[in-house]
Amino acid sequence: MRRLASPRVSALLILVAAALGSAGAAGSTAAEGDVYRLTVTATIGPATEGWIEWLAPDSGRYRIEQSNRTYVFTGSSYAILDKRQGAHVRTGSAAFLGSFSERAAARDALRGFLAGNLAGVEVKEHPDGRKELHFRRGETKIVAIIEEKLSALEAQERKIFVIPSDEVTSSATERRVGSRPARPIRVYWFGPAVAGRVAVTAIENFAGPASGRGNTRPAQPDATVTSHTTFYERPAAKGKSSALPGQRPPAGEIQVLSQPVGSWTAQRAIKAYNGINGDLRYKPWPRTSVRLSNGEKVTVVPDRGESTGKVRSGFAVITRTTLVTVTGSGSFALNSIPGTARLLRPIL
């Protein structure tokens, strides 16, 4: 889901989004109000680029249409709709969506125009009555032409802010820590806290084969991957977490990732533990067996990818149903890994 964390939008649109204020958009429960369609043109130096924005000033929802991609913010979800790769959706709280709620370049200018607050906005009128909003975001000059106004009902009927579920090929959904996953996967975690760290959030990821209209490759069922990650943070993190967009893992962060043991990604990792990595052949990684608190017998494999010494960056736990990968920006003493692994338990 790195495409959701850092969507490959045009350079001008990135500059515009970066310059927007930090005021968050209202949630999906806010009154929709009227919806406006604007033609937006941004110019910085000799470069000029244009796109269409559908804006709901009251609720904060938007739709940005470019040649090959469309970006939709519904209040609770942000989606990239790619004609070749399908839809990639991120769903959760305002913190989990981060600055994705701010990508509509003309939102604040339109709000100011409708409220009669024209600070920083110059308004021009075409002979046909259309309004042009001229404003800047940093060094970027922007012109937004109001082309059309819809009622909330008309916008709903035309599905302006609808994310087509049949086109979703990947998703990242924020979950309450300790709650059962929505998809059929057996998930493990350490409970609410472990080693001075607290479980702050969880993400359920889904990735399937691209099925966009422009993709002619047949979908492969074994290409589908579902995973669940719980993030543990120290109090010193003060709300920061790599689960949030644009943030690096705070010191001491621990991630516990669960994925079906039969998935292609899990099988590839297990083969690497067993000494098979593509054309490479080597001795299987050392491992041990332990029993979890529920009596379940599992295999524990300390990581050797970054170090073979007395301190490791993480470890894997192989159960009958799940490959659990425990990693962290801190470190795990090799002799403590079996004991730490025993603390894992399934979310039932």
Image (tube, helix red, strand yellow):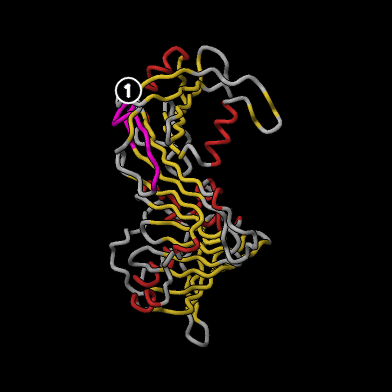
Residue 328 appears in the figure = no
What residue sits right under mark 1 in the picture?
196
Tell me where residue 75 appears, x and y as whole percent.
Answer: 36, 59
Q: Give, as a three-letter code, the residue at label 1.
A: Gly
The vertical placement of 290 against 35, above or below, is: above
Graded by Cα atoms within 10 Å as few (under 14), some (14 to 19) or many (20 or more), the crowding at tag 1 reads few
The vertical placement of 28 against 290, above or below, is: below
What is the total number of numbered labels drawn onto the structure image? 1
Is 157 covered by the magenta stretch? no
Residue 315 appears in the figure = yes
Tell me where residue 21 appears, x and y as whole percent.
Answer: 42, 54
Residue shown at the point (58%, 24%) measured from the top left: 305
Is 185 covered by the magenta stretch? yes
Quarter of the image where the C terminus is located: top left
The vertical placement of 307 against 23, above or below, is: above
Give the quarter of the image for residue 46.
bottom right
Taking the image as shown, residue 166 lies to the left or right of residue 212, namely left
Which secondary structure, mark 1? loop
Tell me where residue 238 appears, x and y as whole percent.
Answer: 34, 33
Residue shown at the point (38%, 68%) measured from the top left: 56
Taking the image as shown, residue 58 lies to the left or right of residue 139, namely left
Give the quarter of the image for residue 66.
bottom right
Q: In this view of the protein, which residue sits in the foreground, 294 or 137?
A: 294
Furthest residue toward bottom: 128
Residue shown at the point (37%, 67%) measured from the top left: 57
Task: Specify start and end residues of the magenta stretch as a single range.
Answer: 184-200
